């Protein structure tokens, strides 16, 4: 709803959703805390150039700081690898080939093609003779774990992928893994705009997988999983553009129950009391603010509050609240208990803990963007001078700050509510849906304890 020409977007406290949007920032913060902790696992390390999914070290580290322990390549940092890859184009310095020989003698696995000469003129031509002599000794009569192909080395070392998708019905799935000395965790994201159901096979075992939701901060035990060939398969369902952390740690916590719909959805029909633009309205039916005849409501941008009540004879084992369509964010309060900010569809969450038998109160603080108010302003004459019109896409800049603004005088055109330096909206720009559109329903559920599946 606010722009800065073609240079960017205004992003700050004057956005309508700045306060409610904190929940989105908390989601990002939780994700970053998890993704910055520990390290990304790598099965091998390459010298000088990135190759595949391995780590990279410079030649000086390869020559001076690499050691071998129990057949593993070990760096000063403590990072351990199944093998080391030395990429080149037929040329290696003598000291590099000597180090390969030393590592092989210590029991390491090395991947490198056979070199034919040195790329350096230091000690030329003896340097080329030494490289060829060492190469004939190592590559023509191999006595250690020397491979010329990374794929062959991976197979020989018994390395399996960190994460794979075994089956899926829909969705573009991405997985990122981190680990430390105590735990492994996998960030699984569905990038598709449709829900996805799929199974992931993760290189972790011996622990009950947990599902950490960065959006809500909740931790639950995975409900459907099994161990197979030293790995763990986890069945997942993710909503559109939804993510979850699958965590393996020594002492898993949380409770995960299978839930099934118990009865048909219960409609929350209202009437709804709506506080908006300084007014109190009674709504028998939900609809977009932009469809109202009252201009103050029609063009409203900001946060408005809906209130209603509903009765329950008894609180079921589980109860979801489904708000239907919301434009665009909403803070949900049930019986005075804050149930959080819901900032993306589907606007559905478990509210069981906030419910009680008898009459319940529901309060929804819904926030939209600046778009409709900016269109509303265009229904009135501009009380400032506009610069060159760049068309609908590029908009029109404010040519200069008007006198009344500089001198802190009353605004000449009281119908205008906003003040920006760039304007994209026109008098006939279509309004967009705003507010709570619904339908709002309660979905009772029952629980069945989850169990580990057999292979």
Image (spheres, rainbow, N blue to C red):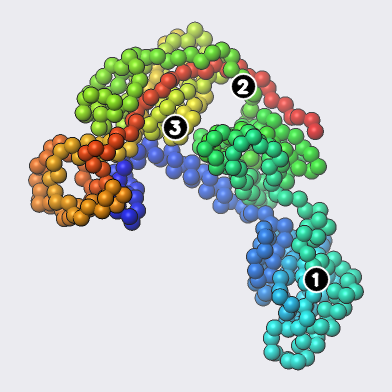
SS for tag 1? Answer: helix
Q: Distance between the Cα atoms at labels 1 and 3?
A: 56 Å
Q: Position of residue 394 (x, y in %)?
A: 29, 52
Decide: few, some or many residues near mark 3? Use Cα within 10 Å; few <14, some 14-19, many ≥20. Answer: many
Disc with the residue nearer the chain's start (2 vs 1): 1
Residue appearing at x 76%, y 42% in the figure: 231
SS for tag 3? Answer: strand
Q: Is residue 94 above or below residue 302?
A: below
The residue that mark 2 highlights is: 259
Q: Position of residue 344 (x, y in %)?
A: 45, 34
Residue appearing at x 20%, y 55% in the figure: 388
The residue that mark 1 highlights is: 103
The residue that mark 3 highlights is: 342
Decide: few, some or many residues near mark 2? Use Cα within 10 Å; few <14, some 14-19, many ≥20. Answer: some
Give residue 323's mark. none
- Left of 218 or right of it: where is 327? left
Q: Pick the residue in front: 168 or 200.
A: 168
Disc with the residue nearer the chain's start (2 vs 3): 2
Q: Are marks 1 and 3 in contact (CB under 8 Å)?
A: no
Q: Position of residue 256 (x, y in %)?
A: 63, 28
Q: Pick the residue in front: 96 or 179.
A: 96
């Amino acid at each position: 709803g606010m722009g800065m020409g073609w240079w960017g977007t205004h992003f700050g406290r004057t956005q309508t959703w700045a306060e409610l949007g904190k929940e989105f920032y908390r989601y990002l913060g939780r994700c970053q805390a998890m993704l910055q902790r520990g390290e990304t696992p790598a099965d091998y390390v390459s010298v000088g150039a990135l190759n595949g999914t391995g780590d990279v070290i410079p030649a000086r580290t390869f020559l001076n700081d690499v050691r071998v322990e129990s057949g593993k390549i070990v760096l000063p940092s403590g990072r351990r690898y199944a093998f080391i890859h030395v990429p080149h184009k037929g040329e290696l310095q003598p000291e590099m080939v000597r180090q390969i020989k030393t590592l092989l003698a210590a029991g390491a696995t090395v991947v490198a093609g056979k070199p034919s000469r040195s790329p350096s003129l230091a000690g030329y031509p003896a340097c080329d003779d030494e490289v060829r002599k060492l190469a004939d000794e190592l590559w023509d009569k191999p006595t250690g774990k020397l491979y010329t192909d990374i794929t062959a080395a991976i197979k020989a070392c018994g390395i399996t992928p960190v994460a794979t998708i075994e089956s899926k019905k829909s969705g573009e799935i991405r997985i990122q893994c981190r680990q430390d000395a105590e735990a492994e965790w996998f960030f699984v994201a569905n990038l598709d705009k449709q829900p996805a159901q799929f199974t992931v096979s993760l290189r972790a075992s011996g622990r009950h997988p947990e599902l950490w939701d960065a959006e809500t901060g909740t931790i639950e035990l995975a409900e459907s999983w099994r161990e197979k060939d030293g790995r763990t398969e986890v069945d997942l369902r993710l909503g559109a553009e939804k993510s979850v952390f699958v965590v393996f740690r020594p002492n898993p916590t949380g409770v995960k129950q299978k839930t099934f719909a118990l009865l048909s959805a219960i409609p929350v029909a209202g009437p709804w009391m709506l506080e908006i633009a300084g007014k109190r309205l009674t709504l028998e039916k939900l609809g977009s603010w932009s469809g109202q005849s009252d201009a103050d409501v029609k063009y409203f941008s900001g946060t408005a509050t809906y209130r209603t009540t509903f009765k329950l004879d008894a609180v079921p084992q589980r109860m979801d609240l489904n708000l239907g369509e919301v434009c665009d964010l909403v803070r949900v309060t049930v019986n005075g208990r804050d149930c959080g900010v819901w900032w993306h569809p589907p606007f559905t969450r478990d509210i069981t803990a906030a419910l009680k038998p008898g009459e319940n109160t529901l309060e929804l603080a819904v926030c939209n963007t600046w778009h409709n108010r900016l269109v509303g302003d265009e229904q009135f004459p501009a009380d400032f001078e506009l610069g060159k019109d760049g068309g609908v896409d590029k908009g029109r800049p404010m040519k200069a700050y008007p006198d009344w603004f500089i001198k802190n005088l009353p605004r000449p055109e009281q119908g205008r509510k906003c003040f920006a330096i760039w304007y994209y909206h026109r008098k006939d720009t279509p309004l967009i849906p705003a507010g709570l559109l619904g339908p709002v329903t309660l979905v009772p559920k029952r629980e069945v304890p989850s169990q580990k599946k057999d292979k």
